[in-house]
Image (spheres, rainbow, N blue to C red):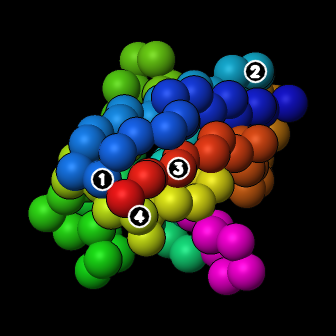
Amino acid sequence: QVRLVESGGGLVQAGGSLRLSCAASGSIFSINVMSWYRQAPGKQRELVALITSSGDTNYAGSVKGRFTISRDNAKNTVYLQMNSLKPEDTAVYYCKTNARELLSTRYLEVWGQGTLVTVSS
């Protein structure tokens, strides 16, 4: 079973930076797209950024130019560098991936447990 564990959330002042990490573990055969979502109180979960296995990236308009997604395929880890944070970035941030386990032929969607990011004004 593939698991995702996020880390790096916390409290930061507006204008500050945080770096989130998400490591995949388990009986992994391969991982394709890795992505970050966020869910603010009372709002729907939204895609923040994604990165393909070849390194292509895509960002939500609200974070473009401030956030950078990257991955280390050797470590099955994805990162989200968040700069120039704003109070409206406050949310629980979730990591998601599509992973294929050893001895399996299918890719399954896997979510992390989430990490809270709070940006104070």
Give the Cα separation between the discs numbered 1 and 2.
Answer: 36 Å
Return the residue found at the far right: 1
- Assess disc 2: are there few (<14), some (14-19) or many (≥20) residues with their C-alpha within 10 Å of its C-alpha: few
Marks 1 and 2, the one that precedes in the sequence: 1
Span highlighted in magenta in the image: 38-45
Q: Which residue shows up at 37% across the image and 59% down it?
A: 121
Residue 87 shows which numbered tag?
Answer: 4
Marks 3 and 2, the one that precedes in the sequence: 2
Q: Nearer the viewer, mark 4 or mark 2?
A: 4
Residue underneath mark 1? 14
- The amino acid type, in three-letter code, at marker 2 is Gly
- The amino acid type, in three-letter code, at marker 3 is Thr
Q: Which residue shows up at 86% across the image and 30% down it?
A: 1
Q: State yes or no: discs 3 and 2 in contact (Cβ < 8 Å).
A: no
Q: Position of residue 50 (x, y in %)?
A: 40, 59
- Assess disc 3: are there few (<14), some (14-19) or many (≥20) residues with their C-alpha within 10 Å of its C-alpha: many
Q: State yes or no: discs 4 and 2 in contact (Cβ < 8 Å).
A: no
Residue underneath mark 2? 26
Q: State yes or no: discs 1 and 2 in contact (Cβ < 8 Å).
A: no
Q: Position of residue 42 (x, y in %)?
A: 73, 80
Q: Which residue shows up at 21% across the image and 68% down it?
A: 64
Q: For numbered disc 4, what is the local secondary structure?
A: helix
Marks 4 and 2, the one that precedes in the sequence: 2
Is 81 situated above or below 27? below
Residue 118 shows which numbered tag?
Answer: 3
Q: For numbered disc 3, what is the local secondary structure?
A: strand
